[in-house]
Image (cartoon, rainbow, N blue to C red):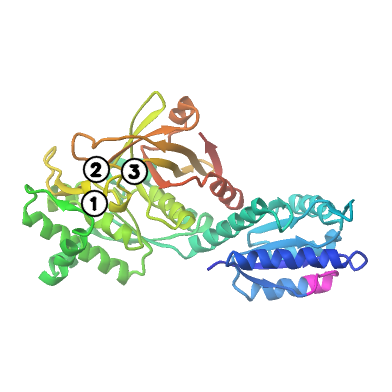
């Protein structure tokens, strides 16, 4: 559950029954949306009390701070508090003039907003600007969106991502600056050697590695040509990955598959990772941590399993999206057609997930490291009728909503993270607070 500091501000000369009513309505609206709030009972009207309330906010472990203007408020009062909590995401909320007894009235709430916002801009303090009465559903949705972003930013600082191996096949865009990522975006990356994972896998007992087969059969059929040898190997990987997650307190994990698993161990981890993605952990492969961080962000925003894959082709604005064998099972258009197949290609052997992704609105996104910091590619598309790539690989064909030429020219990598739904506004807000440049397709 998200927790937000809700700060009511006013001027002692302008407080009224109507202004108090508006503030109380705002509190009720947040409570109704199940947002936990820490707030002051009476509106703050002077600098000393504002600063003291800022101290209290810092002891409450909140995700962000929401300033609400009951009336006109002197900027010095609001700034006294803002300077104490400027490290947290901030949104300022006021309401416009309204009808009362047939006349347009105002408490001065709206007038305070640009004065305070201008002061924050001058100090370089990031914030969101939300105008609308507490009774307006669209306004409350904007508040809910801010709360979601504040919680995502806080959660990112607590995320631990395991990296087994390193970036595959010389993919420079998958490499990253460890400290920059930790300091600017939030997640800690825990490096784990491939040998460590395989050593755990080899020591798994029969009951432990058979757990994979029992669980995966809830979501997938097994191809007849897929021998038990490969299913046992996959089960061992499943056990080992879950063990690593427990040992290192991981929220997410990425496994380098090429070529230690695909050619030497002769079994990639895609089906195991696809299953673990449904068990609450964000998973990926090929050692591309920036894509995995992108997946983590979409997962925090959407609260649903997310996927990733390669942009393999684009024609007439339609993108072919597919991975080697990773695909969370519940994202299939038809759950009855999900199958574990043998990859059996280019000298590689072992199980992969074969499914056609469901249709609908998707958000595709990738976080990239650039010469001057981070850049985020953001876009939405519409999933279309699709078919398995080459008859076996998981796939989605989607129509981009935007400029195809811009899409191509701004690619930083072939890998993208994808989730269902439209989260563009939330991603833009996240970019604002974390100083991430962005490219909208």
Which residue is under mark 2?
A: 324
In the structure shown, which secondary structural element does the residue marked by tag 1 occupy?
helix
As drawn, which residue projects farthest toward the front? 102
Residue 381 locus on image (x, y percent):
44, 37
As drawn, 67 above or below 221: below
Residue 127 locus on image (x, y percent):
68, 53
Residue 153 colored in magenta in the image: no
Which residue is under mark 1?
A: 270
Q: Earlier in the sequence, mark 3 or mark 1?
A: 1
Q: Earlier in the sequence, mark 2 or mark 3?
A: 2
Label 2: few (<14), some (14–19) or many (≥20) C-alpha neighbours in 10 Å:
many
In this rendering, position of residue 197 left or right of residue 49? left
Confirm or deny contact between disc 2 and disc 1 (CB under 8 A). Answer: yes
In this rendering, position of residue 217 left or right of residue 323? left
Query: Which residue is painted at 42% across and 47% down in the image?
Result: 420
As drawn, which residue projects farthest toward the right? 13
Label 1: few (<14), some (14–19) or many (≥20) C-alpha neighbours in 10 Å:
many
* Quarter-of-image position of residue 163: bottom left
In the structure shown, which secondary structural element does the residue marked by tag 3 occupy?
loop
Point out which mark residue 358 bears.
Answer: 3
- The label nearer to you, 3 versus 1, is 3
In the structure shown, which secondary structural element does the residue marked by tag 2 occupy?
loop
As drawn, 126 above or below 403: below
Confirm or deny contact between disc 3 and disc 1 (CB under 8 A). Answer: no
- In the rendered structure, which segment of residues is drawn in magenta? 42-50
The residues tagged by marks 2 and 3 sit, at their Cα atoms, a distance apart of: 18 Å
The residues tagged by marks 3 and 1 sit, at their Cα atoms, a distance apart of: 19 Å
Q: Earlier in the sequence, mark 2 or mark 1?
A: 1
Whether residue 196 is visible here, answered yes or no, is no
Query: Which residue is painted at 36% across and 65% down in the image?
Result: 250
In this rendering, position of residue 387 left or right of residue 429? left
As drawn, 43 above or below 349: below
């Amino acid at each position: 559950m998200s927790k937000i500091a809700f700060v009511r501000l006013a001027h002692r000369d302008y407080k009224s029954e109507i202004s108090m009513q508006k503030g109380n309505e705002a509190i009720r609206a947040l409570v109704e949306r199940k947002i936990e709030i820490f707030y002051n009972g009476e509106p703050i009207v002077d600098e000393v009390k504002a600063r003291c309330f800022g101290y209290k906010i810092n002891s409450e472990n909140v995700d962000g701070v929401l300033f609400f203007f009951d009336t006109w408020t002197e900027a010095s009062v609001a700034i006294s508090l803002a300077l104490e909590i400027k490290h947290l995401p901030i949104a300022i909320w006021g309401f416009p003039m309204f009808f009362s007894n047939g006349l347009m009235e105002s408490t001065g709430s709206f007038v305070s907003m640009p004065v305070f916002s201008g002061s924050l801009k001058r100090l370089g303090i990031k914030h969101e600007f939300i105008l609308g009465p507490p009774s307006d559903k669209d306004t409350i949705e904007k508040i809910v969106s801010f709360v979601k972003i504040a919680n995502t930013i806080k959660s990112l600082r607590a995320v631990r991502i395991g990296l087994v191996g390193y970036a595959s096949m010389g993919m420079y865009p998958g490499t990253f600056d460890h400290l920059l990522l930790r300091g600017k975006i939030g997640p800690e990356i825990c490096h784990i050697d491939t040998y460590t994972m395989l050593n755990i896998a080899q020591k798994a007992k029969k009951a432990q590695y058979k757990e994979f087969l029992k669980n995966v059969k809830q979501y997938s059929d097994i191809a007849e040509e897929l021998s038990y040898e490969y299913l046992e190997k996959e089960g061992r990987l499943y056990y080992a990955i879950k063990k690593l997650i427990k040992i290192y307190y991981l929220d997410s994990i990425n496994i380098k598959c090429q070529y230690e698993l695909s050619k030497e161990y002769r079994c990639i981890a895609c089906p195991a990772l696809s299953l673990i993605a449904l068990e609450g952990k964000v998973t990926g492969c090929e050692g591309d941590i920036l894509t995995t961080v992108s997946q983590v962000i979409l997962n925090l925003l959407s609260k649903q399993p997310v996927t990733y894959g390669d942009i393999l082709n684009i024609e007439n604005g339609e993108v072919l999206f597919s991975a080697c064998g990773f695909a969370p099972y519940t994202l299939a258009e038809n759950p009855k057609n999900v199958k574990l197949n043998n990859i059996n290609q280019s000298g590689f052997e072992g199980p992969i997930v074969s499914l056609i992704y469901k249709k609908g609105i998707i958000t595709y996104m990738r976080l990239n490291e650039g010469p001057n910091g981070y850049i985020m590619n953001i876009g939405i598309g519409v999933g279309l009728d699709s078919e398995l790539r080459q008859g076996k690989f998981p796939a989605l064909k989607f129509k981009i909503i935007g400029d195809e030429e811009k899409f191509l020219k701004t690619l930083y990598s072939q890998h993208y993270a994808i989730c269902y739904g439209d989260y563009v506004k939330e991603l833009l807000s996240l970019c604002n607070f974390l100083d991430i440049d962005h490219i909208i397709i």
